[in-house]
Image (spheres, coloured by chain):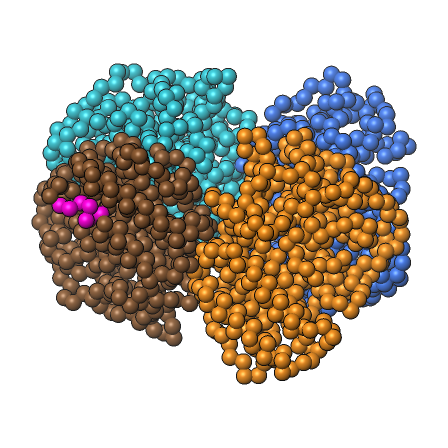
Chain colours: A blue, B cyan, C brown, D orange
């Protein structure tokens, strides 16, 4: 973040946007955690606030008084450097602090940040601020997907809001984009913000490939289901096949077959499946099996980055075949911020792009998202390569 | 319940008392379920309401319109007869129905009950009403112990209320009450309400025994701890010893050793242990080990019932050595109400008495409570026999 | 055991009988442990030997040299008093000591015992010897049931031996034996050997009951299956119903439905079910559900003991409704032998009688066997009461 | 395999070598399975035999009579194409077929193969034979590591054999080998045998790196331990840190600290650690943490393959940073042999090189081994890159 922006405005906008996401919720919706991957919205509100308090206000705002000493224990996510914390699976067991006091905490920290940045401007603080803002934007996306999980697994299937649009159609015909063999440059190379896992701009050699211009749609995915894709072991990884059978998976998450018609739960409530919408809420295992069935494969993250300027993206996070690994010359930052990315670089897959839940100004062509191969609660999708 | 009482008043009082118990709660406190044995307060409010709707209004109130068809799925506890239900461990994952709509549901059903009992009086309905009232009273006790668990496991350790007294002292000296050998009659034998598991008044032969006049106190229990009671395998059942080691148990539930001083979480917040208070929140395994250490044993439920008129009781539910089994000639009721007691008569222990959380007019000398041997979140205690 | 017997002969006969049980085995059969409840035959051979070494030879045979110091770690079962041990679930992971060296160990200890009892005779030693012999006889029964489990869960279903008869028919018609109300004396009262859990002869008051003269047969049990007994939740305890569903139980252990005909694995190999044979390999849960279905119940252990002289028994261990609890005035022995029975007196059910696998001179009318309610690998059966 | 070799001799040598590996075992050692990753030696003997019977004799030897129809169920490993099978974790529960009958099975199949290849020679059969031989060689390595696990986890710590040498010293000084930036060719490119996962010779672009000439030794690893490497969370992946804590890992597998001195179990029994020997039996997580501690990293599999001609290798399988993924243009074979590699290409790491347990003529510079990141029972090691 350069000094010519108005970083404080960007910060305040971000804070406000987070709260706007939560506006349609009942207080009860802020509290629950149906699975370990999903955090209570209240926790996201507190954790993003704690991040600014812990990494900016405590070390840099002289005279700053911590809002509540116990909150560090409650709202630390995974920073071993910073001390003990509530174990992740217990977040949904905490009725206190109340939603009200979490909002008070937010206002208190936002106010202290405003004071600090009104009186003090230096590059180190701006760099920390920028990380904090992007951190909160990541949680904005998680807020939406976690809210969807909380409401979409409730037997009453309540709607979140009529305003959120999660069903962008693929309006153009599927085409194959041909990419030539050769050396490509991969990784971030501008002055704009990026995470450490995008750095280490480097060369990769790509063999020729053709990548699909469109994401796979619901219609195409229903063909896979109807062709028995979930019953054919030879399309799946051994681990994926176990996952299908142990969890009795037979369709994407949130899909319901009612009297022979496919519906899916959306943030607007339960709706009929729309054929031309990119399929979403599928695991890497399912994306891989679909590609096998088509006689194709998933792109690597390098193929994706090299070709991304030739197709539209941003509706779904796109599974790639690439494992989440450090780039050449990757180095972890010192201290707590070094825990941001590096310690997760094993046994996960890279996703590229962005989704309908991604806040504006948050993603970019070099952004590397990552999840375990069985997770489905994000707005995931995929395109294929041959 | 006989027609000379005012059953409707009793019903309305009970309904109101349930809501009074919840009055000090924040909305968030109604929602969470930190362990499977503890239900969200919201669920108790809905379930006790559903019980009247399902067993009285639906079959007996002509023209009654169900409040919400989905609520049966949400608020059925374990009645297989009545259909599918949310699995117990998922109760804390439900943010909806909201607390507000559960209160609306309560008012709706209470109103419909009032109408029904104003216009219709017959013994069958009164019998069902009586069961429903006592059922709700059982949940009043669970509400208090579940609220205690929810708040007492929160890192902020919030107080529930300054008004609730859970620390009755033992003011008199411990004495041994001698009981003579012979035949005693056991079981309910009046016209007043009781559960089916108390019926089948029958004879048992008791050998001579001496029973302690007082419950074991915190002071006595601390002596057991300090004598290494939790480290001596020979005091414990094999299963109890595994439980101690796997869960690293070294004190009653809610006890904290802070700078060498014992505190316990109470519904009034964290307090220093008071020596003359009966110990509570201990498992059967712990009660048994303490008795072994004293060279004594726990009373059977028959010994307890035969001698109960000679000592005060009602502060703590008292663990007995008796397994929870049917009395001679026990028969299960037909239909859903037959699931109330009988199907739990295996691998549990009987508790006798009542506790500070037991509503008035709810317990009696023949009342049989029952829990698994490792559970501690009730106000359990014990006396000993030699 | 009195001095007029020949205790040494009894000992030597017992040792030889244990080895005879193992004679039909392949070496491989001695080693495996398919479930935690089943021990490898090799382990039984070593453990019964270690018992004599640990409790008689080490303390009482001057100059006795321990066969191998490591064997105590390997062959201790559950005696916390005696020190560390291989955890139970790991017994099947041990290929060494070899079968051959276990037999050498047996011969060594048997020889040392022979020397000791040839030179030394006193009542204390005889008492220990008697416990050791009865301990080994208990393991003879377990050897047979564990061998059956090992072979009966092998896909090749090998036969153990053609000589072992496990299918005694019920030759006489089922009758109801009426027992009168009154006081009965329960517990051991002769000079002959018994375990500590049978002691404390005491009075119980029994109400009138009728007990079936015969054990329930395969034919009667098939009627229960065909009447949908495994699908009717109201016949089962809640815990039993969970057990049925989680384990997909639909018949006794070892039963196979092949082309519409019921077979069962026996120690003579896979055989057609014989109708008049007492059903066996059923859990307490199944015995209880059958009794419910008949409108009857299981006897208590007191009813069984009071009436046992009026019917034949000894073919199947018989499930009772009684929880395994101490008799009045029960006291545990000091030291390791005090761990024999007392520490298991919780959450188990009493079985009475004996089975085709019980060695002669081992059971008696007051003998109390006990198992958890879901276990089926013993030769269990039941009769009913109304 | 070309026709100028003597494929039948190569087959017979391989079969004999497998049996020689088992020669020092007691019969009991053939049967047990202490953890799910380790198979009983008996199973390896049967499975490698079943492979020839299933894929060569049944389809290609006219008139071939299957040895025992049940063996396919027992000895199939993971081929879904071929039918049902004993689940992997149950292999150690099978006492039958006996070791003796497995050897008879081996002789029967070896004989039938000899007849077939004496009378019939064609390239298709030779190709299948070659896969079968290499398959058996892979199991020779697993036999040694599984035998080590079986004996090394036995409390008696028996020696396997004095002849097996697992402790090759690193005799030369550690040096850094510098590799230049540029395009390298990766993958198999000769006519000799290789697995499908090595095919698809392709280009990769490597940035400059320096790779250590020697494997990390016990001495270096002890420095890591003594520097508190197992206690420093920032050296570990989040998943690795959980693994360390949940399993209380503080040293490589088979290491014992006795009176302040490090010993390790080897196939020659328990021995003092030798300082200049390459460390082994460490997980990927440990290799990664060590490299972090040194300020270095693990090589990718491409870096390893590009530089392997400049250093000696073959003592330890070497962990790389590379996830196990398909090469460009990888295609799975049809039918059962297509299950050999492809379905495991997710959530595993590539190992390169070979080990003291690898049979001669089995590995090569392009060979890709693969295991989950927490496994340690192979002879794993690593070198580092900066």
Horizontal arrangement in the rendering, residue C317 relative to residue D249 (left or right): left
- The quarter of the picture where the N terminus of chain D appears is bottom right
Q: Is residue C356 visible?
A: yes
Which residue is located at x 58 percent, y 32 percent? D261
What segment is highlighted magenta in the picture?
Answer: C5-11
Frontmost residue, A174 versus D194: D194
The answer to whether D84 is drawn above or below residue D377 in the figure is below
- The quarter of the picture where the C terminus of chain D appears is top right
Which residue is located at x 22 percent, y 47 percent? C11
Frontmost residue, B5 versus B311: B311
Horizontal arrangement in the rendering, residue D352 relative to residue B159 (left or right): right
Q: Position of residue B76 (x, y in %)?
A: 43, 48
| C48 magenta-colored | no
Q: Position of residue D263 (x, y in %)?
A: 58, 38
Q: Quadrant of residue B313?
A: top left
Which residue is located at x 36 percent, y 53 percent? C41
Frontmost residue, A291 versus B62: A291
């Amino acid at each position: 973040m350069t000094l010519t922006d108005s970083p404080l405005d960007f910060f305040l906008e971000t804070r406000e946007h987070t709260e706007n996401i939560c506006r349609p919720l009942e207080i009860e919706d802020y509290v629950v955690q149906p699975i370990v991957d999903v955090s209570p919205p209240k926790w996201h509100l507190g954790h993003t606030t704690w991040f600014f308090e812990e990494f900016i206000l405590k070390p840099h705002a002289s005279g700053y008084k911590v809002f509540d000493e116990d909150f560090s224990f409650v709202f630390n996510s995974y920073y071993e450097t910073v001390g003990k914390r509530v174990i992740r699976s217990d977040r949904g067991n905490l009725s206190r602090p109340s939603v009200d006091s979490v909002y008070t905490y937010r206002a208190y920290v936002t106010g202290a940040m405003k004071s600090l940045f009104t009186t003090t401007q230096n590059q180190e603080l701006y760099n920390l601020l920028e990380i904090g803002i992007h951190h909160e934007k990541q949680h904005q996306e998680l807020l939406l997907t976690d809210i969807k999980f909380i409401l979409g697994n409730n037997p009453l299937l309540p709607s979140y809001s009529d305003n959120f649009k999660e069903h962008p159609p693929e309006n153009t015909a599927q085409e194959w984009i041909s990419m030539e063999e050769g050396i490509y440059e991969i990784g971030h190379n501008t002055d704009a913000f990026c995470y450490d896992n995008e750095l280490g701009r480097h060369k990769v050699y790509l063999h020729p490939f053709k990548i699909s211009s469109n994401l796979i749609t619901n219609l195409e995915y229903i063909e896979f289901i109807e062709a028995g894709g979930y019953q054919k072991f030879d399309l799946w990884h051994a681990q994926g096949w176990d996952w299908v059978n142990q969890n009795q998976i037979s369709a994407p998450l949130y899909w319901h077959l009612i009297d022979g018609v496919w519906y899916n739960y959306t943030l607007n409530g339960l709706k009929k499946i729309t054929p031309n919408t990119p399929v979403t809420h599928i695991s890497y295992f399912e994306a891989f099996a679909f590609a096998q069935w088509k006689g194709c494969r998933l792109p690597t993250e390098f193929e994706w980055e090299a070709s991304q300027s030739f197709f539209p993206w941003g509706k779904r996070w796109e599974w790639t075949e690439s494992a989440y690994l450090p780039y050449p010359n990757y180095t972890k930052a010192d201290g707590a911020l070094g825990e941001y990315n590096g310690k997760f670089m094993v046994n996960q897959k890279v996703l590229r792009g962005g989704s309908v839940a991604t806040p504006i100004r948050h993603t970019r062509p070099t952004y590397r998202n990552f999840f375990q191969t069985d997770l489905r609660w994000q707005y995931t999708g995929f395109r294929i390569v041959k």
